[in-house]
Image (cartoon, rainbow, N blue to C red):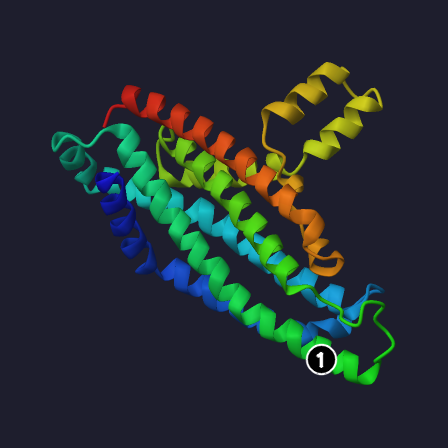
Amino acid sequence: MRRVRLIATATLRESLQQRSFGLLLLAALAFVAGTLFLRQFNFGSSELKFVADLGFGMLSLGAALLAITMTTQVFFDECERRTLHLLLARGVSRSEFLLGKLGGVTLLLGLYTFVLLTCLCPVLWARETALLALMPDGFERGYGLNFAGVMIAAYAFWLKSWVLASAVLWLATFAQNRISAMGCGLLLLVIFHTGGVLAVYGSNGGWPAWLSYGVRYILPDFAAFDLTPAVFEGADGFVGRAARLTLYAVLYGAVFIGLGVLQLRRREI
């Protein structure tokens, strides 16, 4: 675990020095800060829900892009600089190397989620306070948002990006270059969001039902990580779902890392 921790710390330090992380973080913060202006383009949903959906949409998209780009970069940087040879020569196992890289990216994703949430919560709180002052009887429970639910929803998006990072790390172990790994990572992001669509298409006779359900249950379903209803319905009914999602994410992460270790053993470094 000490080796994994040292590799994770070095990976986080290197990732924070990447320009792509800073640019994406600044763009996300600017977007979240501008949600109060973008609410003018609301097409019918409640104002608070519209602002929350915009903020969480940027959190989810930014975390997914970070998971793809940073995971690919930290892996291929080690290969291109030949530092992977030095680590393996010093007795670091392939599983320790991959776990360390994934740990560093996980910390980076957690930092991104925390910073974005720190910016989003004051925006939601300010707008909720203004609406309560204008319409004191407009909210059934006396408030519009449940900030414990906000934390749970953000945690679920962080779990989703972690699963994606573990899958991209597995892809990087057999990809020839970082461009192909990033392209396949974007493709995986789309595929992992289509579990419900595949099930509906199969039930309508688009293809055999066993095939659609097989694909749905073999691949992770990213739609299950959407816990944004907890923001408005309260966190009580979603704590159990968040705990089950944690086990769900850990299971898929372990599978992807195991596949990555097997592939890295066969890769010519």
Q: Which residue is mark 1?
A: 129
Name above or below for residue 195 compared with residue 236.
above
Q: Residue at x 37, y 41 (%)?
A: 102
Q: Nearer the viewer, residue 97 or 15?
A: 97
For the image, the number of numbered tags is 1
Q: Secondary structure at mark 1?
A: helix
Percent x, y of residue 100 = 30, 41
For the question of whether residue 28 can be seen, the reply is no
Name above or below for residue 101 compared with residue 110.
above
Q: Is residue 89 left or right of residue 228?
A: left
Q: Is residue 147 left or right of residue 45?
A: left
Q: Is residue 197 left or right of residue 63?
A: right
Q: Residue at x 42, y 31 (%)?
A: 171
The picture quadrant where one finds residue 23 is: bottom left
For the question of whether residue 21 can be seen, the reply is yes
Q: Residue at x 78, y 84 (%)?
A: 133
Name above or below for residue 209 compared with residue 165.
above
Percent x, y of residue 212 = 71, 21
Q: Residue furthest right?
A: 137
Q: Residue furthest bottom?
A: 133
Q: Residue at x 69, y 52 (%)?
A: 236
Q: Residues within 10 Å of mark 1 (few under 14, many from 20)?
A: some
Q: Nearer the viewer, residue 129 or 38?
A: 129
Q: Is residue 126 left or right of residue 180?
A: right
Percent x, y of residue 49 = 75, 64
Q: Which quadrant holds the N terminus?
A: top left
The picture quadrant where one finds residue 261 is: top left
Disc 1 residue type (three-letter): Thr
Q: Which quadrant holds the C terminus?
A: top left
The picture quadrant where one finds residue 132 is: bottom right
Percent x, y of residue 15 = 33, 54
